[in-house]
Amino acid sequence: MNARPAPARRVLVVEDDPTVAEVVTGYLTRAGYEIAHAADGLAALELTAALRPQLVVLDLMLPGLDGLEVCRRLRAGAGPPVPVVMLTARGEEADRILGLELGADDYLTKPFSPRELVLRVAAVLRRAEAPPPAAAAAALRAGDLAVDPAARRAVRGDRELALTAREFDLLLFLLRHPGQVFSREELLRHVWGWDFGDVSTVTVHIRRLREKVEDDPAAPELISTVWSAGYRLDPPGHGATQAGDRNLRP
């Protein structure tokens, strides 16, 4: 008896330009995704709640609620955050950075290659859904911070941290390499899987991560900046240790 094929992963495309929406939808459909489409921000939020897509492709310039507000509301919702790939015609770096600060996992600036978008969507989903290797599934600790790779949970003290998929991956990578300095280019390659890209993406995610794991993000003690070199995680005591069979309490 033949096994049933795995259900197609659902992607919500939020784009008000009919031509762009048709092209993006067509390429993603041919890549094997089940596609839903919303032409404005309110419809995007309603469809996300109703369909629970595995990823949202989100244009920033939308009628009604703009993409930044949609992303903000998606991140403020209950449950695990849905990965977001932003599309924007805006060339200003500030707009891209603001989108990343709100929790977007990736972005493309118009005009863009639809094939590149398909690759970016696949890369974001692969990282969000991939189970950790068995040898790397043990929980890690650094001070009062505990991270469980298998459950994809991070707890500080008695409080569970609301991390995006990319923030979790970045924190986990740094915890697994305590005391090592990584440049932004190296983090882009190891955590994002990109051999090239805008390194300001790393800067934004480090800043967001510090806001969630540091007592004072302006004077970080856990994730240090090594000037002209990159970033280093400095766990208290003798470094990040495996938590063994200790439970991570929410």
Image: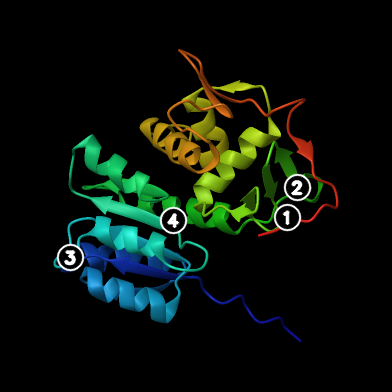
- In the foreground, 93 or 207: 207
- In the foreground, 103 or 199: 103
Q: From what the image shows, is residue 214 above or below residue 126?
A: above
Say left or right for 220 vs 61: right
Residue 143 drawn at (x, y percent): 69, 36
The residue labelled by disc 2 is: 139
Q: Cβ–Cβ below 8 Å for labels 1 and 2?
A: yes
Report helix, strand or loop for mark 3: helix
| Sequence-earlier tag: 1 or 4 | 4
The residue labelled by disc 4 is: 121
Depth-wise, is mark 3 or mark 4 nearer the camera? Answer: 4
Report helix, strand or loop for mark 1: loop
Q: From what the image shows, is residue 153 above or below residue 202?
A: below
Density class for disc 4 (Cα within 10 Å; few <14, some 14-19, many ≥20) is many
**Residue 248 disc label:** 1
Looking at the image, the residue that sits furthest to the right is 245
Residue 231 drawn at (x, y percent): 53, 24
The residue labelled by disc 3 is: 19
Q: In which quadrant of the rendered image does the N terminus lie? A: bottom right
Depth-wise, is mark 1 or mark 2 nearer the camera? Answer: 1
Say left or right for 9 vs 58: right
Residue 138 drawn at (x, y percent): 79, 47
From mark 3 to mark 4, how far is it between C-alphas?
Answer: 19 Å
Kindly identify the amino acid type of the residue bearing the numbered disc 1: Leu
Q: From what the image shows, is residue 230 above or below residue 44?
A: above
Kindly identify the amino acid type of the residue bearing the numbered disc 4: Val
- In the foreground, 170 or 14: 170
From mark 1 to mark 4, how far is it between C-alphas?
Answer: 31 Å
From mark 3 to mark 2, how far is it between C-alphas?
Answer: 47 Å
At x 17%, y 45%, the residue is 90
Kindly identify the amino acid type of the residue bearing the numbered disc 2: Ala
